[in-house]
Every structure is written in C-alpha cells, then in structure tokens.
C-alpha cells in the first residue's frame, strides 16, 4: 500500500532548512519542493510520461518567488494535460517554439521576407522605392509590432502624418503596398485574415494627374525645338530614340549594343531592364537605326548606346530626357514618359489594333500565356505600325504633318 503523503503548508516550507544533502518535501500528486544545500528551494513536478511510462521532472519555479498556491495551480494544469494524453514537457517545448516564432514574426521582419518575393519580379529602382517607403513611413511606428497585434486602426494612425503633409500619392501607394503585403501574409499562413483591407478609405483620396504630354498637333513644334534649341546631340538623340521606340525612360537609357540585332533591326531588351521583368522586343525602324548609327559615331567604346559623360562604362542618367525637355521649354507641358502617351494617342486615333499598341508599350496582359503569345505574334504587325509611327514623326519634323498626310501614310503600311 503506497505511503500516504501529507500536503505541505507554508509554515512547513518556511521551517525547512538546508542540509549537507538535498532535502525533498512532497505535497502529493507529483508536486515536490527540493531544498538544496545552497539554501535555494525549487518546485518540481514529477510525472510518468504518457505512453513511455518513464518518469520525468519539470522545474516549475523557485520559492518564495512562486508560493505554494501557485505551484499547486501549475501542477493541476499539467495534470489536466496528462489526462488528455499530452506530455507537459512536450507541450512546454511547443509553447516555447511558438513564442520564439512570434517574437521573430514582427511586421518589419515579415516585410523583409515579402520583399524577397516581391523584388524578384520588379526592377531594382521600383524595389528601392517600395523598401524606402516602408522604412520611412511605416517601420518607425509599426515595424516592431507583432503581426497578430497589428490592426487597421494602428496602421491608419501610423500613416496619418502623410495625409497631414498632403503627401496623398505616397499615402495611396503605401496603403496599396501594405494591403498586398497583408494578403501575402494570409496566403503564407502568417495571418488568418487581412487586417488592413480597406485602410485607403480612411484617408483623403489624391487627385490623380496623368503624365504631362502634348497633343498630336503640337508634335511638329516639339521636333523643331529639338533640332534648333541648345541641347547636346546625345540628349536630342535620346529623346528621339524614346519617341520612336515608345519605351520607358529607364529602359531607353539602358540600351546596349549587344542587345541590338542589326541583321533583323530588333532591339531585344532583357527582362531585368523592364519594369515588369518581362523581356521585350522592339522593332527598329529606318529612323531608329539612323539614331544608332549616329550614336556609334559619337562613342563606340561604351557598351551602352547612350553612355554617361562621367563614366564611359555606365549609361546616361534617366533624367536626361526630362532635363532636355525642360531646357527647350516643355517643363510644364511634357515629360519623357508622356511621349508614350502621345504615341498611344496618335496610333489609336488612326485605328491601329489596340493589342499591337499595348504590346509596343510593353503593357503586360494579366494573362501571362496570352501576353507571351501576343508579343510573338504581333512582332510583324508592330513592325508596320512602328514604321508608320516613325514616318509620322519624321513628317512632323519636316513641318508637313497634317491629317491627310497621316492618312496617306496609314494606307501605305496597311
């Protein structure tokens, strides 16, 4: 018959004195108080492990930091786990791992993981802008918070200074990026639901302003100023190169000789140089090829078509075209990116196939298979369209541009 254990009392615990050997006091049902020779007193829970039936000890705490009532309460919690077949030691280990994971699962740390996924699909400049916006406007106030503790109200208050500073475009982009990040957290199991959905509605909406551009009938004046005003030859060539090829400013400056297929008159832009990280082919017209020949004469040693004046191994600054346009009087009227809009307007007005135009502008179709198909199939059609567009520009430069002449050009390539 097992020996009956008399429960401990606070008086008995205080009266226990350390000896030369460890002294063990029993409270029953696995709870023990061990009095060490050093004088410290430790609470221990001794139990038989489920299924294994081996004995195990768990340290609950030390006396008097943990009093008798607290030790008994913890013992009961572990006995309830044992009643369900759960090993308290394993349960504690899981709790510790979960706590460690949550400690690392802060808003900022989770964002860093999202950056790795997001940045693999976009340009370096776009990635830099995204990361900088989080570091400047989100991380200082919310970066240290656990994802599970982050809610819409806290995010809104963190972003409120941007609204007060009237930085509404930045605010709108940040709301969109935070929402995209939160959706990623849900999809990867870091969160159960998106707590930031709809936070954009809490702020004043920005008034969107399209890229500054000019009307088609203003193109002759632009060409005249490009040819007569005081700008460098390389700047003029860059503006015209972008105008003829319909590419983005950042893509235009990165044109490399090795990417030009002279035999077939095609510029094959690598995916890493494109905004959406998708390779893009540009049919080069007679006028585009003439620009290349001129730039070859100016500087054939650089790997870039438009080399930097300071470093021949690098390309010209992406702001060069904008600066040239400002210098010839278009500061409030036209930006380099707006020339794409001008091309789109003219081509749509003259009834070119919208799919051809979208492919020429490298606007990626949401359907990836269709986008790849369109880029390949429309290359010949785009060649005709780009030829018409270059002739249209050339005619504008000569001062002979009119609706009737443009219609005639269209008939020639139809």
Image: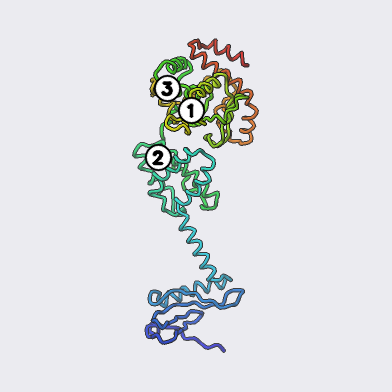
Numbered label tally: 3
| Horizontal and vertical percent position of residue 237 | 48, 22
Classify mark 3: helix, strand or loop.
loop
Question: Does residue 253 appear left or right of residue 330 in this picture?
Answer: right
Near-viewer residue (188 or 18): 18
Q: Residue at x 61, y 13 (%)?
A: 412
Q: Are marks 3 and 2 in contact (CB under 8 Å)?
A: no
Which mark is nearer the camera, 2 or 1? 1
Q: Do the residues labelled 2 and 1 touch (CB within 8 Å)?
A: no
Q: How crowded is mark 3: few (under 14 residues within 10 Å), some or many (20 or more)?
A: few
Query: Where is mark 2, residue-wise?
Result: 203
Q: Residues within 10 Å of mark 2 (few under 14, many from 20)?
A: some
| Horizontal and vertical percent position of residue 7 | 46, 83
Q: Are marks 3 and 1 in contact (CB under 8 Å)?
A: no
Query: Where is mark 3, residue-wise?
Result: 232
C-alpha distance separating marks 3 and 1: 12 Å
């Amino acid at each position: 018959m097992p020996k009956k254990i008399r429960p401990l009392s606070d008086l008995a615990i205080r009266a226990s004195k350390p000896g030369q050997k460890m002294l063990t006091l029993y409270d029953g049902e696995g709870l023990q108080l061990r009095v060490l020779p050093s004088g410290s007193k430790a609470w221990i829970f001794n139990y038989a492990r489920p299924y294994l039936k081996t004995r195990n000890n768990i340290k609950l705490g030390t006396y008097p930091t943990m009093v008798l009532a607290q030790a008994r309460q913890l013992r009961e919690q572990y006995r309830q786990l044992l009643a369900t077949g759960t090993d308290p030691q394993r349960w504690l280990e899981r709790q510790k791992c979960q706590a460690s994971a949550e400690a690392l699962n802060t808003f900022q740390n989770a964002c860093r993981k999202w950056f790795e996924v997001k940045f693999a699909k976009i340009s370096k400049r776009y990635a830099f802008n995204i990361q900088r916006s989080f570091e400047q406007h989100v991380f200082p106030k919310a970066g240290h918070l656990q994802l599970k503790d982050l809610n819409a109200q806290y995010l809104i208050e963190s972003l409120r200074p941007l609204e007060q500073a009237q930085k509404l475009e930045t605010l709108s982009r940040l709301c969109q990026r935070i929402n995209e990040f939160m959706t990623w957290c849900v999809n990867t199991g870091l969160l159960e639901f998106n707590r930031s959905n709809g936070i954009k509605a809490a702020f004043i909406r920005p008034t969107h302003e399209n890229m500054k551009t000019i009307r088609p009938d203003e193109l002759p004046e632009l060409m005249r100023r490009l040819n007569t005003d005081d700008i460098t030859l390389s700047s003029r060539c860059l503006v015209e190169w972008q105008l003829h090829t319909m590419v983005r400013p950042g893509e235009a400056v990165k044109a490399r000789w090795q990417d030009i297929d002279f035999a077939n008159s095609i510029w094959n832009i690598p995916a890493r140089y494109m905004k959406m990280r998708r390779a893009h082919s540009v049919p080069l017209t007679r006028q585009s090829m003439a620009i290349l020949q001129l730039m070859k004469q100016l500087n054939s040693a650089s790997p870039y078509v438009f080399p930097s004046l300071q470093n021949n191994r690098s390309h010209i600054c992406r702001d060069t075209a904008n600066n040239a346009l400002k210098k010839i009087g278009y500061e409030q009227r036209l930006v380099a990116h707006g020339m794409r809009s001008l091309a789109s307007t003219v081509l749509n007005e003259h009834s070119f196939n919208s799919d051809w135009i979208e492919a020429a502008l490298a606007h990626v179709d949401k359907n990836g298979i269709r986008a790849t198909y369109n880029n390949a199939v429309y290359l010949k059609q785009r060649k005709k369209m780009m030829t018409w567009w270059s002739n249209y520009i050339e005619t504008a430069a000569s001062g002979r541009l009119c609706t009737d002449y443009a219609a005639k050009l269209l008939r020639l390539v139809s």
